[in-house]
């Protein structure tokens, strides 16, 4: 029973990791960009939520009405203003520029909000749970996070395969030069993809801030979880990313059962095992040229 | 025709490299003599500059030449640091002798690490190396014989065994630091001038082309990765010989051992040997200037690196070299026209002499 409980909690945690990873997976799919500042953008969203909740007293989930469009706007501006300049055949510029951005965001957050650990208070929602049987209880909030991850991925799939924007995303992903010849403005399409990715990041950051303590320094670890979920699931597959997040969450929950310090290590080790056995992930759709 | 061809020769040295070598030897002599006239604080700063210079050269070899952008070199720095403590405390090896052993230990760990991270390419390789470094950090935090998460200190007896008296201990560490910095530059320089260097520069310029011309890209990269791990491990042992204490967070710190190093190389100029030297100077000047402003120096450094990458990806040294055609470390081969041995010119000169 204890193990079943650990696995259930792991699956629900995996929903949060899938949300971390969705944005990373989307922008890799559309423009082959690996954003090293991704984790720090999640933490930035969390701090924006904190500032708004502290400033206005609204419930964290209500703050999403503002935080999601703000992060999307930041995403559009970031892509148009900086990241579009780095895209090309050479992998160094995007890597090093996003790495620089990561360090800048971390330290600006450190200067503005100090190194203290923070938490978003969500009232009764934090502890509300559904009892299943005698020993297992499922928290309402983790369940909401997991279902949000499923919902976000379902919506993104609809956007990708049922809308004109999605067609433009897939066309630039397949061959951005030909897409440009067909009248697609790549710079605008890439910026829209980043905006969409950071809208998801806003959701992920706010959920993370309600679920766990956070501080300016935890961004890189979130990047690694997101990255691991993407690679475990297979590049370019959003449902694969959800599966990757769940596998990572379950591995961490089981690791924590074995040893108090084993949670994060178990997640990393699970990732490395998948990497050795299935280098392209479990459900690959896109090949990394 | 063959005589005409003889008028061209392949040259490697430049005027800058010959004068530069003289200045470098003189400068090194001054630095070696510093313990006899300089202050202890100067010595400490110079050791720090020396190990950052060595790390920057090694990272530049990886990223600038072999195209291996690693964000996980802290793995080998930490491994080298811990190896020093293991050899010195548990095996009774002299701390100075433990430094090369630490390099070998790091290189041995690099083999299985490469087996895993080389499954990822480009940007994914970068994050993969980072994950592996985290795994090493979390694993060392579990080893209670090495102090677990809180770390371990070098016992006083071991420290006293380095050399007799504090002055000689500090001088010995200082000279070791200089030797490692010079060694790292020499290693990269000689490697690049060798046959393997030609392969590496070819890989840097175009992987497809170098592969099609018979360079074994994969093999070359693996070797560079292992050599860089060896050097980084030695630097790790030196770093923690100066700090006398290591913990997982200090040993495997991504900001200290990778972010700073990346900024140094990018600002100075990636893909050149001079670049990291310029970058390390900029880094220490900025750090001194912004010492009172907390984490602002990292923000400024990050912004400078981002701007550099966007506006002048060749770095400060790249700009200087373009403007003045300067090369202090001639690793490339140039075709030089030598008029003295050009037969046509020689004959006309002969004829000129015969004329009254």
Image: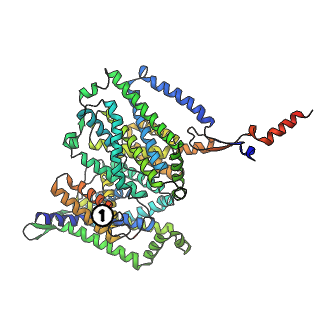
Residue B143 placement: quadrant: top left
Horizontally, is A33 left or right of B4 in the view? left
Which residue lies most toward the front here?
Answer: B2
What residue did someone put label 1 on? A204
- How many residues crowd mark 1 within 10 Å: few (<14), some (14–19), many (20+)? many
In percent of the image, x 41 and y 38: which residue is there?
B52
- The answer to whether A244 is drawn above or below residue B91 in the figure is below
Residue B257 on image: x %, y %: 37, 43
* Closer-to-camera residue (B307/A237): A237
Image quarter where the N terminus of chain A lies is bottom left
* Closer-to-camera residue (A35/B58): B58
* Closer-to-camera residue (A164/B94): B94
Horizontally, is A285 left or right of A204 in the view? right
Q: Does residue A67 appear in this view?
A: no
Chain under label 1? Answer: A
In percent of the image, x 39 and y 54: which residue is there?
B126
Residue B264 on image: x %, y %: 45, 43
Residue A21 placement: quadrant: bottom left
Horizontally, is A37 left or right of B88 in the view? right
Residue B343 on image: x %, y %: 78, 41
Q: Does residue B291 appear in this view?
A: yes
In percent of the image, x 53 and y 28: which residue is there?
B25
Horizontally, is A118 left or right of B41 in the view? left
């Amino acid at each position: 029973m204890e193990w079943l409980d650990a696995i259930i909690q792991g699956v629900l945690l995996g929903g949060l990791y899938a949300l971390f990873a969705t944005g990373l997976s989307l922008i890799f799919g559309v423009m082959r960009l690996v954003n090293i500042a991704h984790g720090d953008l999640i933490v930035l969203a969390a701090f924006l939520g904190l500032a708004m909740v502290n400033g206005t007293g609204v419930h964290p989930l209500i703050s999403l009405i503002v935080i999601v469009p703000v992060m999307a706007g930041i995403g559009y501006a970031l892509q148009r203003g900086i990241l579009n300049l780095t895209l090309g055949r050479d992998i160094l510029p995007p890597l090093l520029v996003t790495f620089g951005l990561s360090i800048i965001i971390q330290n600006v957050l450190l200067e503005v909000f100090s190194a203290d650990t923070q938490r978003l208070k969500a009232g009764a929602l934090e502890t509300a749970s559904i009892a299943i049987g005698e020993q297992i209880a499922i928290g309402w909030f983790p369940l909401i996070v997991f279902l949000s991850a499923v919902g976000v991925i379902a919506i993104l799939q609809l956007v990708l395969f049922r809308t004109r924007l999605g067609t433009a995303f897939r066309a630039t992903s397949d061959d951005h030069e030909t897409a440009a010849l067909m009248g697609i403005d790549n710079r605008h399409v890439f910026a829209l993809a980043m905006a969409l990715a950071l809208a998801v990041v806003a959701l992920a950051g706010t959920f993370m801030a309600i679920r766990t303590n956070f501080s300016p320094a935890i961004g890189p670890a979130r990047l690694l979880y997101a990255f691991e979920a993407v690679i475990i699931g297979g590049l370019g597959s959003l449902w694969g990313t959800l599966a990757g997040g769940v596998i990572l969450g379950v591995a961490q929950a089981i690791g924590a059962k074995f040893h108090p310090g084993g949670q994060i290590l178990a997640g990393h080790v699970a990732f490395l095992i998948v990497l050795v056995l299935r280098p392209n992930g479990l459900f690959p759709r896109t090949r990394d040229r | 025709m063959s005589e005409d061809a003889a008028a061209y020769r392949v040259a490697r040295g430049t005027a800058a490299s010959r004068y530069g070598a003289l200045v470098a030897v003189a400068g090194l002599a001054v630095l070696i003599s510093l313990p006899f006239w300089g202050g202890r604080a100067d010595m400490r700063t110079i050791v720090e500059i020396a190990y950052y210079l060595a790390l920057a050269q090694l990272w530049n070899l990886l990223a600038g030449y072999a195209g291996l952008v690693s964000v996980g070199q802290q793995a080998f720095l930490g491994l080298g640091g811990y190896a020093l403590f293991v050899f010195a405390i548990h095996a009774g090896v002299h701390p100075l002798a433990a430094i090369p052993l630490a390099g070998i230990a790091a290189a041995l760990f690099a083999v299985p690490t490469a087996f895993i991270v080389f499954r990822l390419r480009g940007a994914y390789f970068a994050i993969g190396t980072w994950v592996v470094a985290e795994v090493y950090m979390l694993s060392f935090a579990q080893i209670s014989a090495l102090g677990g998460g809180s770390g371990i200190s070098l016992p006083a007896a071991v420290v006293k065994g380095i050399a007799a008296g504090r002055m000689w201990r500090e001088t010995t560490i200082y000279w070791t630091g200089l030797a490692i910095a010079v060694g790292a530059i020499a290693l990269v320089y000689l490697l690049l001038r060798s046959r393997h260097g030609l392969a590496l520069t070819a890989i840097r310029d175009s992987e497809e082309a170098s592969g099609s011309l018979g360079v074994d890209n994969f093999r070359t990269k693996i070797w560079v990765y292992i050599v860089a791990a060896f050097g980084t491990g030695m630097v790790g042992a030196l770093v923690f010989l100066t700090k006398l204490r290591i913990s997982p967070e200090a040993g495997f710190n991504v900001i200290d051992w990778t972010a700073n190093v990346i900024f140094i190389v990018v600002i100075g100029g990636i893909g050149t040997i001079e670049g990291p030297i310029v970058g390390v100077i900029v880094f220490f000047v900025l750090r001194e200037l912004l010492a009172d402003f907390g984490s602002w120096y990292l923000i400024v450094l990050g912004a400078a690196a981002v701007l550099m990458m966007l506006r002048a990806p060749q770095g400060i040294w790249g700009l200087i070299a373009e403007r003045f055609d300067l090369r202090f470390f001639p690793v490339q081969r140039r075709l030089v026209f030598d008029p003295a041995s050009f037969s046509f010119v020689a004959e006309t000169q002969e004829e000129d002499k015969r004329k009254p």
